[in-house]
Image (spheres, coloured by chain):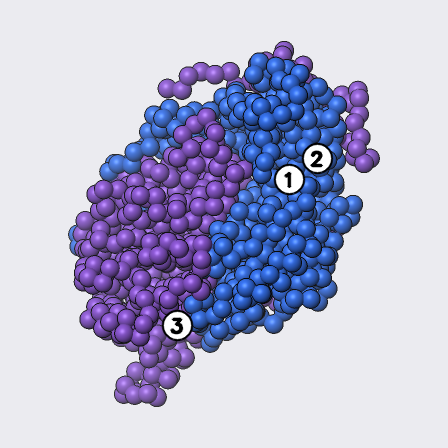
Chain colours: A blue, B purple
Amino acid sequence: MAPTMDRHLKEESSSESQSPVVNLEPPVKSSPVLIDGISLNGPALDLHAAESFIQQSMAIIMEDAVRKATDVREKVCEWRSPEQLKELLDLELGDGGEAQSKILQRCRDAIRYSVKTTHPRFFNQLYAGMEPYSLVGSFIIEALKPSLYTYEVAPVFTLMEEAVLGKMIEMIGWEEGGDGLFNPGGSVSNMYAMNIARFHHCPDIKELGLSAVPRLVMFTSKECHYSVSKAAAFLGIGTKNVYVIPSDERGKMIPKVLEEQIMAAKNEGAVPFMVNATAGTTVLGAFDPIEEIADICEKHNLWLHVDACWGGGALMSRKHKHLLKGIHRANSVAWNPHKMLMACLQCCAFLVRDKTGLLQRCHSAQASYLFQQDKFYDVSYDTGDKSIQCSRKPDAFKFWLMWKALGTKELECRVDRALAMARYLAQEVKRREGFRLMMEPEYANVCFWYIPPSLRSMPDSPEFWQKVHTVAPAVKERMMKEGSMMVGYQPHGDKANFFRMIIISPQAGKEDMDFVLDEIHRLGKDL
Amino acid sequence: MAPTMDRHLKEESSSESQSPVVNLEPPVKSSPVLIDGISLNGPALDLHAAESFIQQSMAIIMEDAVRKATDVREKVCEWRSPEQLKELLDLELGDGGEAQSKILQRCRDAIRYSVKTTHPRFFNQLYAGMEPYSLVGSFIIEALKPSLYTYEVAPVFTLMEEAVLGKMIEMIGWEEGGDGLFNPGGSVSNMYAMNIARFHHCPDIKELGLSAVPRLVMFTSKECHYSVSKAAAFLGIGTKNVYVIPSDERGKMIPKVLEEQIMAAKNEGAVPFMVNATAGTTVLGAFDPIEEIADICEKHNLWLHVDACWGGGALMSRKHKHLLKGIHRANSVAWNPHKMLMACLQCCAFLVRDKTGLLQRCHSAQASYLFQQDKFYDVSYDTGDKSIQCSRKPDAFKFWLMWKALGTKELECRVDRALAMARYLAQEVKRREGFRLMMEPEYANVCFWYIPPSLRSMPDSPEFWQKVHTVAPAVKERMMKEGSMMVGYQPHGDKANFFRMIIISPQAGKEDMDFVLDEIHRLGKDL
């Protein structure tokens, strides 16, 4: 495939340039050069020693951070309080260095006391599990240190990002194509959405800022991710200019109220510019009704952004993609393959339907030292000016490599299995004494209460719920100290603290679901 | 040190919970559970196969992405045009997966055609070189997939971030301490600075947005990083509200003009809120006079941010830290250890002198599902609400590990050597026929022109400079196609295209400086 090329520059260039070839051994110092008393001859880094250290570390990483971390017989975490851990880790940074053997021990300790988020019984966040292809992709990225601003510095990863974005755009259903970029987190994707939406609404904002335009307002549901509020503050929109639309009992935005609020905002003299619909809310896993919201956005000429960071995984499943029905009508989408699809952290795409270069126009600053126009290749591959970052990691590669290895079908199977597993857990919760399901899961969030025997005969009352409210934190404390599993809990609106299980990884089986319920009971039955 | 604990949960909990222990082998399917036709028994991932794949990949990474990538006898890059590379890489993502052997080959190819930014002759960006400790730190992070929002999910890395920030604050000279966080890029750090500065100026902005306040303006030099302009657009300030202060012939902001512009802005009815001083500009490596700027900021009650992303490394050097004299008077500092100090990408700190929780108040959104207040440990260790991100990588660990291994003294030696090397290169440029130094380097940027023999007898004139302008792009094209080294070029103001060498890594010696000049001449002598 690739033309054979001589990879040894030594032979190629030394005859012409007469420059001494730098060996890995420091060269014979026939003419030592000193500046400010510092010797400048040869490399000052012992590459052999460096490689030997990396090699030894890899063995530790393989054993402790991969094999043991994913072994169901091992702990999810070995809990230490901040005070204990500070003492164990000896965090101080001093003038002198430490021997490699000491540093290797520090690596072991860092791994030992870290939470094993890749463990089959880690159900605490919207990500979980160990995906080997993606992991290898991330190791390659770390070793090569590429940055995605220009094709010349990151040729391979620039093209891979384009390929992955193109495929994700296809899954969303934008038949004419689109644009996008990977960025460090769904929160940042949501910021991109707001910035591009307001720029689309009024391009002058880029130069003149918001003090020159009327009050812009946006709409999102009560159940949306907290990053929407953070983004509104950060982008100068203001948190009060995010109009919060109530959700129904399942956590879905109520479109009728959305339209009423848009009208009300206009009557106030505010200028609505976008609606954020959530596909897969953080706590309940709810999907806003995108079709109905899209109708309203079209009618009122508002940018529709779909925050599908968590729910986007369902687009891989023919069985479940109906949850996002209408997403092809969105103007932009945030979708994190590091969540349901298990790409290594972070792997987050922001996608726009626009194909006229809106993303570039909105964010460009045309730095002359990076984006020279007199380069010898097609500079449309220098994608960095679409971004708000300068250095940007090629996160798409992690997803590309696993997608190549697994294929779309296996990704689909995994999503289908995770969602079936959530249904199994919900059945068990309903079946078992002392557990109460909050609602049937639509996605991979299963929300439920554990009622210890002491409370089971109490009638539902404010007093009962006050007592139930204290159960999950107490069980969580014991769970962490035991290290047997990690499951999150939270209050929500007027609901007392409940557990929220998130099911993603194929490492978990129905036995692990049974274990979770058994273990919660074991830990909390005396409460 | 650590109390001995039984790491085998199997024995600990199975007697009580009666749950079947999940073996690495799928369990005997005595009672198969099917939901939606999907078998839920046991893990659906073959962990043995996964581990074997990771192990094989590690050998490839070690050989191709570490050993060969850093070998001076190998190419810095194996150039392919986008069209050629697309064909070589077979980027399409399909329904079916691929065999592990195929994926291993894809890893080799991705490495082969990527630029080796860790090569001793990569001088193209403000980062370079291979730092083994930091690299191992990043591998550990990738394997463990931590996220820094809460102590419970990232105990080790939360404490390490605190330790590193504390030490950086000490190097800055904030004797009373401070606050901060690591984030994905210096551009983002500069955004944090602008947001916190305006929040400090007027806390109402967070809720009400910029449309409710008078026009805010900020000041920065002509030579500042382009992220300042990007940030002003993104944060709703507007690029025109960034007042650009001219720099002197060395690239340093002229304080007298700064003060005049502040007065002029006030007379226009605008509200100045911050000054961005740059410590180490991108192209010239210039340091703005912080002391004088701090005087002006104090007088006018303006937030002083120092963008020391690039120049911060000099704080490690007793010999060179005078370049940042006065930085202890700044209200905030951006400093990227991934640049001069060689931590793996990305490793970027944003630091504030404030100790009253300003960072938290400015960015918090108090998500109840993450930042529960009824946790059993001190929730002040849940630092996530200071951040605009949700998932956040523990980049500080990469720096912590290398700092432990090398000690402050070795970091200092490296900075001193890089800056001495820059002076050696400048001497050589001046000494050699056909090279012209733009200015004596103050830091690690060496800017110079190459004048091919055909132009050497021409007098300095617009025509001469027009011709010189075409030399660097032509040499760069040949350099890339040869793969022998990477050095950046750019125009700057009214200056014709020139080379900008960035010297960082101890892998390079004076022989590599000689090589660069020889090679530019070899590649460009016929132009």
Instruction: Determine contact: label 2, label 1, CB under 8 Å.
Output: yes
Residue tagged by mark 2? A439
A218 on left or right of A112? right
Residue in the picture at 37% in, 24% down:
A84
Q: Are marks 2 and 1 on the same chain?
A: yes
Give the camera-side residue of B18 and A306.
Answer: A306
Residue tagged by mark 1? A284
Q: Which mark is residue B240?
A: 3
Task: Judge depth for marks 2 and 3 and give the one in front.
Answer: 2
Q: Chain of mark 2?
A: A
In this rendering, the answer to whether B290 lies above or below A283 is below
Q: Position of residue A315 (x, y in %)?
A: 71, 50
Position of the N terminus of chain A, as image quadrant, is: bottom right
Label 1: how many Cα within 10 Å (few below 14, some 14–19, many 20+): many
Count of number-bearing discs: 3
If you read the primary sequence from the N terminus, does the residue marked by circle 2 or circle 1 appear first? Answer: 1
Q: Amino acid at mark 3?
A: Lys
Label 2: how many Cα within 10 Å (few below 14, some 14–19, many 20+): some
A283 on left or right of B498? right
Q: Position of residue A392 (x, y in %)?
A: 48, 56
